[in-house]
């Protein structure tokens, strides 16, 4: 997942939350803060990993800056 994000040199991800939703708890949702090399939060990421009842799987990320603007929204 990290290779799909638009990160600057020295940025790192810190997981700040985890939840499960959906029928039979088939969607894992992880939230991350993007921390720069100075230790300041510069953005956030929501990562979702969905498994269908019939075995299909999809993953998505939504990356936002500190103003809440979408930087990118990908599904694979």
Image (cartoon, grey):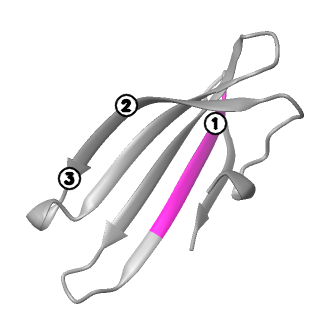
Residue 37 magenta-highlighted? no
In space, the residues marked 2 and 3 are separated at their CA atoms by: 13 Å
Q: Earlier in the sequence, mark 2 or mark 1?
A: 2
Residue span colored magenta: 59-65
Q: Position of residue 40 (x, y in %)?
A: 71, 11
Disc 3 versus disc 1: nearer the observer: 3
Disc 2 versus disc 3: nearer the observer: 2
Q: Which residue is mark 3?
A: 21
Kindly identify which numbered label has been placed on residue 64: 1
Above/below status of 11 relative to 55: above
Above/below status of 44 relative to 50: above
Q: Nearer the viewer, residue 59 or 12?
A: 12
User: Dot 2: few (<14), some (14–19), or many (≥20) neighbours within 10 Å?
Assistant: few
Q: Quadrant of the C terminus?
A: bottom right
Q: Nearer the viewer, residue 63 or 38?
A: 38
Q: Which residue is mark 2?
A: 17
In space, the residues marked 2 and 1 are separated at their CA atoms by: 16 Å
Looking at the image, which residue is at 51% across and 61% down?
60
Residue that sits furthest to the bottom in the current view:
54
Q: Is residue 6 left or right of residue 1?
A: right
What number of labels is visible? 3
Q: Quadrant of residue 37?
A: top right
Q: Earlier in the sequence, mark 3 or mark 1?
A: 3
In space, the residues marked 3 and 1 are separated at their CA atoms by: 22 Å
């Amino acid at each position: 997942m990290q290779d799909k994000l638009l990160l600057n040199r020295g940025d790192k991800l810190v997981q700040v939350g985890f939840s499960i939703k959906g029928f039979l708890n088939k969607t894992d949702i992880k939230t991350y803060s993007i921390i720069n090399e100075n230790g300041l939060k510069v953005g956030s990421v929501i990562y979702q990993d969905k498994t269908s009842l019939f075995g299909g799987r999809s993953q998505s990320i939504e990356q936002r800056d500190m103003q809440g603007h979408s930087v990118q929204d990908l599904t694979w």
